Image (spheres, rainbow, N blue to C red):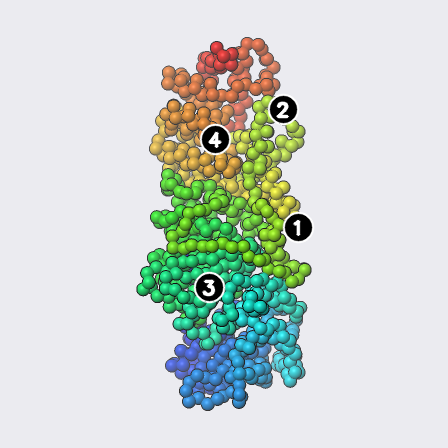
């Protein structure tokens, strides 16, 4: 299955054995009476997961009393918290970070014949209990409506006994905050100070929906003013304050949907059989400053289901309509939204699994949609799943807490299946975003590309892999990279995806209510500012350096070079990139790349570094210069390394020998396969104007001469696919004897060499009027000078002077038009 769920906690394995051991010891659970009967274990259930990961659970003892326990996620130990000696049902429970106070709300048991255990006229009792040690109990609320409680957890525990704050949310549509002062008495005993008068304040009222963000200590809620839904967010701070952070209009209807809470514990009140009849709504954020609201209205059709995602950090929403297959395939469970960091999963048990890319939601091909026909679908839990802090997902029906992540091996398997191109592209990005063992993942993707190099795709897999892999190599290092670097080689996608349709609409951006931002809020505000003012997009495009690169090449040919310092700086950039690239690899390469000067590619690499550095410096305000320079080096090195790795994989796969670097033998089928892959790499990089590793063109030309018939070879040369580098031409002249066939090849190559430039005479003091002799001298001089540093390609064979003489005469004839 696409989603990998690793069990982090299981009531049946982490709590039940402890309870049984307590009973077997004869001591019962402290404060729990005579012990727990086996048939009461079915009452065991999870109540809450606190910000520190600790899990609060409850069960009934043999007398029907309510028992609260805590499972410490760090020590993996259980602890009894408190026993309420009445037969009641728990609505909500929370424990403060110091484990000195417990808050709980309880209602009358639904069993027939039970007397009313609560205060007269009240339906719900909300208690505040001292539990270090168990001592006083204070009644916070005794009302005729349900109440939920949640202690705030400060981000920094700077004091031994700080003021404890408790959020209380009422079914009567108001939210309060209690300020509870605690003091230490008689050693370690912690009690409530002035328990008769606990200060409180009203935070919000007249709302219809609320969600608690455990990890970030935020409260989202929706109020209805003039029949319009408005999403608001309160941020609780460590300094005992709270701020209303934003207001955002939502184009959804909640007026007749009743009262709904998200992440306020796992109360028994929810009827899962009725979940599909009610709207589902949740808010997800991540560290990059994204803000997504996921919404599914009431289910009213057996044929299709609709859900919307409001990408507030992008300024638009997408409404999806998914087909549910045959009419007899009834929907008995509600839709589930899960937060998976860079993705949001939309899951309808037995029907579909939609992995939505929230960083780059523009194109539907960057999100993965799997239908119920997929064999991995039924492996996911069919009970309601609830996203908690981080990657934690709770299946509260089974009492299991999972750590959710994308299943790399399953996703890699999808690449090899016969699937639409949109799925393959989405899978490629999903795999690269996982971040775990990137070298292994990239090797698997390269293997897939190599095995399917001749397959037709509506996108270029090599191109997409180069861009995506380079992007993910530095994306986590700083925010805003999704706006500044290309994520994909595909800019538009018009092909429909089977089983799903969508409508995209612009939405009103959130109105920020504060003027000073830190951490997540700073990133969200930057995203909103980008949506407002950055038109067109700011993504880097290497075609920016095209004209400058052509100018430098032209100047090199004419001998008119601008400042030597400018060119030296560009070439120094290339040296740093190649050094950084070679430092990445612990094993020596088998492909003869990066071993020759190749000034043209080095100029292109250096120009890309210079332009990309300027681009990031303009838009990454506040990021120090050294960090930007390192990110640019890493990005450029990664881009070249991906190309090297593709070629390296192909070279090793076909077990090529260094003898392929000689012209005096026929090419094998393996060499032809490598030549084909190199040609595809060249096509992929040319359209994006990306640099190639120095030495690529020489190796490509050598293989081309060996693999192609002469007329095809010349066509490739004339079309610019094969470049006649100095190293390749010199080696060809040395390796081939003067048979008639070889002479024809040599002359065909020579006549395609560029004419001599004005700078040629600088290499020799013998400047004469006799053109053949000039050419002869120049050729000998260049061969001798190029022999140094080119050992991987050039041996020490004697130059065929007779052939050089004939080539010089031929060249002169061409120049004179004879």
Mark 1 or 3, which is nearer the eye? Answer: 3
Query: Residue 684: horizontal and vertical position, in percent?
Result: 46, 38
Can residue 622 be seen by looking at this rendering?
yes
Q: In this view, does 734 lie above or below 618?
A: above
Frontmost of labels 3 and 4 is: 3
The residue wearing badge 2 is 560
CB within 8 Å, label 4 to label 1:
no
Does 304 appear above or below 452? Answer: below
Residue ID at (42%, 40%)? 649
Callout 2 secondary element: loop
Q: Mark 3 points at which residue?
A: 296
First in residue order: circle 4 vs circle 1: 1
Residue 242 found in image quarter: bottom right
Q: Which residue in the structure is indicated by mark 4?
A: 697
Q: Residue 622 carries which label?
A: 1
Dots 2, 1 in contact, CB < 8 A = no
Quarter where residue 127 is shown: bottom right
């Amino acid at each position: 299955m696409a989603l990998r769920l690793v069990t982090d906690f299981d009531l049946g394995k982490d709590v039940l054995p402890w309870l049984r051991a307590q009973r077997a010891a004869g001591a019962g659970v402290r404060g729990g009476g005579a012990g727990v009967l086996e048939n009461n274990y079915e009452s065991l259930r999870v109540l809450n997961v606190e910000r520190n990961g600790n899990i609060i659970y409850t069960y009934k003892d043999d007398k029907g009393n309510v028992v609260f326990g805590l499972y410490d996620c760090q020590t993996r130990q259980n602890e009894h918290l408190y026993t309420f000696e009445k037969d009641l049902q728990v609505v909500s429970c929370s424990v403060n970070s110091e484990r000195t106070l417990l808050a709980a709300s309880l209602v009358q048991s639904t069993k027939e014949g039970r007397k009313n255990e609560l205060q007269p006229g009240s339906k719900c009792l909300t208690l505040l209990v001292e539990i270090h040690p168990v001592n006083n109990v204070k009644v916070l609320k005794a009302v005729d409506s349900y109440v939920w409680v949640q202690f705030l957890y400060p981000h920094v525990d700077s004091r031994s006994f700080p003021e404890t704050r408790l959020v209380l949310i009422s079914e009567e549509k108001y939210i309060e905050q209690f300020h509870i002062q605690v003091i230490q008495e008689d050693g370690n005993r912690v009690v409530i100070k002035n328990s008769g008068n606990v200060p409180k304040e009203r935070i919000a009222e007249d709302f219809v929906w609320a969600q608690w963000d455990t990890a970030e200590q935020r409260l989202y809620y929706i109020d209805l003013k003039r029949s319009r839904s408005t999403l608001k967010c309160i941020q609780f701070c460590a300094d005992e304050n709270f701020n209303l952070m934003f207001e955002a209009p939502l184009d959804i209807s909640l007026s007749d949907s009743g009262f709904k809470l998200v992440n306020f514990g796992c109360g028994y009140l929810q009827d899962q059989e009725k979940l599909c009849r009610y709207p589902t709504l949740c808010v997800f954020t991540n560290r990059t400053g994204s803000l997504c609201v996921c919404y599914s209205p009431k289910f009213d059709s057996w044929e299709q289901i609709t859900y919307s995602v409001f990408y507030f950090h992008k300024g638009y929403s997408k409404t999806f309509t998914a087909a549910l297959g045959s009419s007899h395939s009834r929907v008995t469970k509600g839709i589930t939204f899960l937060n998976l960091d860079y993705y949001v999963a939309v899951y309808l048990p037995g029907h579909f699994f939609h992995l939505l890319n929230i960083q780059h939601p523009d194109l539907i091909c960057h999100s993965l949609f799997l239908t119920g026909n997929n064999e991995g679908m039924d492996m996911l839990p069919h009970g309601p799943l609830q996203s908690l802090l981080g990657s934690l997902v709770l299946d509260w029906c089974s009492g299991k807490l999972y750590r959710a992540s994308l299943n790399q091996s399953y996703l890699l398997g999808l690449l090899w299946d016969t699937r639409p191109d949109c799925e393959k592209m989405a899978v490629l990005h999903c795999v690269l975003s996982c971040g775990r063992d990137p070298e292994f993942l990239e090797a698997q993707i390269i293997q897939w590309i190599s095995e399917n190099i001749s397959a037709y795709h509506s996108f270029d897999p090599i191109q997409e892999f180069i861009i995506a892999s380079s992007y993910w190599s530095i994306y986590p290092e700083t925010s805003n990279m999704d706006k500044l670097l290309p994520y994909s080689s595909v800019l538009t996608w018009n092909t429909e995806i089977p089983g799903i349709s969508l409508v995209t609409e612009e939405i009103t951006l959130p109105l920020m209510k504060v003027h000073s931002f830190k951490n997540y809020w700073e990133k969200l505000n930057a995203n909103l500012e980008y949506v407002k003012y950055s038109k067109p997009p700011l993504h880097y495009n290497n075609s920016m350096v095209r004209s400058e690169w052509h100018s430098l090449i032209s100047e090199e040919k004419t001998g008119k070079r601008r400042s030597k310092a400018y060119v030296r700086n560009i070439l120094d950039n290339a040296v740093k990139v190649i050094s950084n690239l070679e430092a990445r690899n612990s094993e020596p390469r088998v492909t003869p790349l990066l071993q020759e000067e190749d000034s043209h590619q080095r100029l292109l690499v250096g120009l890309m570094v210079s332009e990309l550095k300027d681009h990031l410096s303009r838009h990454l305000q506040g990021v120090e210069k050294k960090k930007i320079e390192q990110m640019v080096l890493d990005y450029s090195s990664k881009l070249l390394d991906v190309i090297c790795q593709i070629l390296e994989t192909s070279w090793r796969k076909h077990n090529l020998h260094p003898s392929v670097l000689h012209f005096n033998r026929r090419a094998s089928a393996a060499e032809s396969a490598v030549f084909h892959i190199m040609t595809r790499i060249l096509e992929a990089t040319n359209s994006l104007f990306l640099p190639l590793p120095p030495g690529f063109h020489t190796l490509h030309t050598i293989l081309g001469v060996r693999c192609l018939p002469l007329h095809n070879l010349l066509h490739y040369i004339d079309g610019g696919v094969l470049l006649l580098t100095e190293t390749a031409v010199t080696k060809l002249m040395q390796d081939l004897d003067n048979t008639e066939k070889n002479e024809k090849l040599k002359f065909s190559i020579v006549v395609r060499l560029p004419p001599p430039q004005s700078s040629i005479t600088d290499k020799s003091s013998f400047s004469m009027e006799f053109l053949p002799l000039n050419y002869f001298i120049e050729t000998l001089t260049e061969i001798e000078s190029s022999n140094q540093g080119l050992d991987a390609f050039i041996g020490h064979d004697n130059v065929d002077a007779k052939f050089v003489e004939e080539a010089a005469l031929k060249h002169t004839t061409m120049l004179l038009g004879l």
